[in-house]
Amino acid sequence: MAIEKMVLLNLVGSLEDEHAILEELVLSESIHLNLEHNDVYDNNYMVHQYEAMMPQDALPVIENYAHMEADYGEMLEEVKTIASGMGLTLKLDKVNVGRKYQLAEAKSDLVNLKTELWENIEAVNNKKARLKELQNFKQKVSCIKDQWCNFNDLHDLNYFDFQVGMLSYDNKIQIKKNYENISAIVLKIGDIEDSREDIYLVLYPKQFKKETKRLLKSLNWTPLRIPDDIITMPGTLVESTTEKINEIQNEVAQIEKVLLNNLQIKTLALNKIYTRIKIEEKILKIKEEIVHGNNLFVMNVWVSKKDQLHIEEKIGDITDKFVVIAKDANELDKKVIPPTKLKNNWLFKPFEMIVELYGLPSYHEIDPTPFLAITFMLMFGIMFGDIGQGFIYFLAGILIAKKSKVAGGILTRLGLSSITFGFVYGSLFGLEHEQLPWLPHIVGSPLSKVNIMPVLISGVVFGVVVLSVSYIIGIINSLRRGDIEDGIFGKNGIAGYIFFMGFVGTLVAIFKLIPVSPFVPLGIMALMLIIMILKEPLTNMIKREKPYIHGEVGSYFIESIFEGVETILGALSNGISFIRVGAFALNHAGLFMAFLVMSEMTSSFILKFIILIIGNILILTLEGLVVFIQGLRLQYYEMFSKYFTGDGEMYAPIKIED
C-alpha cells in the first residue's frame, strides 16, 4: 500500500554483448529507460574512461540502424501476410522465444514458410480481394429495379456510349437544375440501401464524350465497373455474380484446406517469428536512445529495488564484462524524480484507476489509493445503503470483471459496501422494517424522525474526519518535498488545517456543544489567516533568505489577501459539501418511498410489483450513477486538493507488445 521503491542503475557493457544484454532487459519487463536525466551519471565521460581501459586493437562495432529497421519491417509484413491468408491472429510467444531462438533462425523459418505457403497465400488473398469486390458489386446491382436494359446491346451502339455509376442526392439536384445544358440522358435505375447515393445510367452521343466525362467528374460521379467475367444482362447480373462468388468461395476453401494442414506447427512457427521480430524492434529502439562509444555502451535505467539483484544476476549470466552503478532515489538531486509504480493489495488495487484519472502521485508523495478506496467505499455505502441493490451491483461487478477487472473490481467492492450499510439501515430493494418486519437493522431508515438530523450531522462529521486526514497527508507530502511555505504556512498546510479546525470549533461553540466562547476559535482563525498571508516572508526568515518578499510588496499583499478570502470560503464550502453524504442517504430512501406510495395506489398485485421493479431499476441506474459522481466530486475537489498534486511520471517498463 505504497509507492514501489526505485533504484537508478548506470549500466556499462561491451558492444559485443549489447544485443544479448538488451534482450534480457526487454524480456524481464522490469526496466524503465531514463532519458530525461542522463546528467545524473556523466555517460560521455564514462565512455571515454572505460574505453581507455580496453585493448587498443579492439575494432569499433558499426550497425546500420535504418537498414535493420527496414529489414524488420519487411519481415513483419511478410509474417502478417501469411497469418492473414491463413486466418490467424498473431500472438506473442514469450515462452518459446528468448536467447535460444535468435533472429537468424527466425529468418530461416520465415524463408521455409514462404517457400511452402507463399504461392497459396497470394492466391487466397487475391481471391478474397476479388470476393470483396464482387460482394460489393452484388450489393449495388441488386438495387437496380427496372432490369430492362441489356448492357451488351448498349456496348454495341455505334453513335452512343453509356456509363453506370453512383450519384449523391445533392449532385442529382444539380443535374436537374441544368438539364437543358446537358447533352446526355440521365436515368435513375436503382436505390442503394443505407446510402445517400443512388445508381444512374448516363447515355450520351460519342461526340460529346469528353464534355460528359468532365460534367460527371464535377459531380463526384462514381462509376460502377461491371466485371469482365459477369454476364451483363441486367436480369441475370445478380444471379451471375452470385454464381461467381460461390465459385471463388469454393476455390478459397480448397486452398485454405491445404494451408491449414499442420496448423498447430505453422501457428507456433509464425508466433515465434513474430515475437522475435518484436524483440528486435524493441532492442533497436533502445540502441537508438542510449550512449555508444567505439566498443561499449552506457545506459541509465530505473528498476524497482526488489528487482535490482535479479537484473544484475541475469546480466551476469550473459557476460562478466559489465559494470553496474546503483543510486537510491534519496541519493539523487531533488530535480530527478523517479517514475511512480503503485503497489497496493487486492482490496485497494482497482481504485488505482480512479487515482490515475486525476493524475499519478509523484515518487515522494504518499500513495492516495488506500485512503481513497476506504473513504469512497464508505461514502457510497452511506449514500446508497441497500442489501438487495448492493447485491445486484456485486453480481454485476463479477460479470463485468470477465471483461474489465478494474471496473468489475470497483463495482463488487461498492456493492459490498452498499450491502453492509443496507443492514445498518434495514433496507432490501427499498423495502424497510415497516414492510419486512423480519429484516435486521441497526439504526433503521434514514427517513425515520429520530434519524434525519443524526444522518445529516454524521455526514458533516465524516467530512471533518476525512478532511483532517487529507490535511495531514498534504502536510507530510509538502514537508517531504522540503516545501516549508505550503507545508507549514500554506492554506493546505499546518496553518490552513488549524484555520479549518478553528472554523469547526466556532460552529461547535456557537451550538454550545463545548464550554468555550466562540471568540476563542475565531481568534485562532484570525491568527492563522495572518500567518497564511505572511507565508512567504515567514518562510524566507526561517531559510534566512533575503529579500523576504520577492517582487512588489503591494502586489504580494493584494494576492495574499485574495487567497485568504478564498481560504475562508473554502473552509466553509469544504465542511458543508459533506452534508450531501447524509442528504443522499435520505434521498435514496425517499426516492423509493415515492415508488412505494405509487404502488399502494393500485389494488393489482402485478401492477404493484411492476412499479417496484421500475423503481429499483431507476434507482440502480440513475441514482447509482449520481451517487458515484458525487463520491468522485468529493474525492477530487474537496480531498485531493488538500494533499495530491498528481504530477508523477508513470513507471513504464520496456516490454514487447502486440
Image: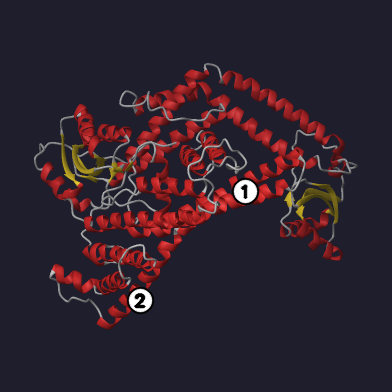
How many numbered discs sit on the rendered protein?
2
Q: Residue at x 40, y 30 (%)?
A: 275
Q: Quadrant of the C terminus?
A: top left
Q: Residue at x 29, y 50 (%)?
A: 366
Secondary structure of the residue carrying tag 1 is: helix
| Residue 271 vs residue 116, the one in the foreground | 271
Q: Residue furthest bottom?
A: 554
Residue occupied by mark 1: 592
> Image check: 468 left or right of 460?
left
Q: Residue furthest right?
A: 148
Q: Is residue 295 above or below residue 250?
A: below
Mark 1 vs mark 2, CA separation in Å: 45 Å
| Residue 577 vs residue 404, the one in the foreground | 577
Secondary structure of the residue carrying tag 2 is: helix
| Residue 401 vs residue 613, the one in the foreground | 613
Q: Is residue 395 above or below residue 507?
A: above
Which of disc 2 and disc 1 is earlier in sequence?
Answer: 2
> Image check: 303 left or right of 114?
left
Q: Is residue 73 visible?
A: yes
Looking at the rendered image, the disc whose residue lies closer to the viewer, 1 or 2, is: 1
Residue occupied by mark 2: 562
Q: Image quadrant of residue 653?
A: top left
Which label number is shown at residue 70?
none
Q: Position of residue 496 (x, y in %)?
A: 30, 65
What's under tag 2, amino acid-wise? Phe
Q: Residue at x 39, y 66 (%)?
A: 511
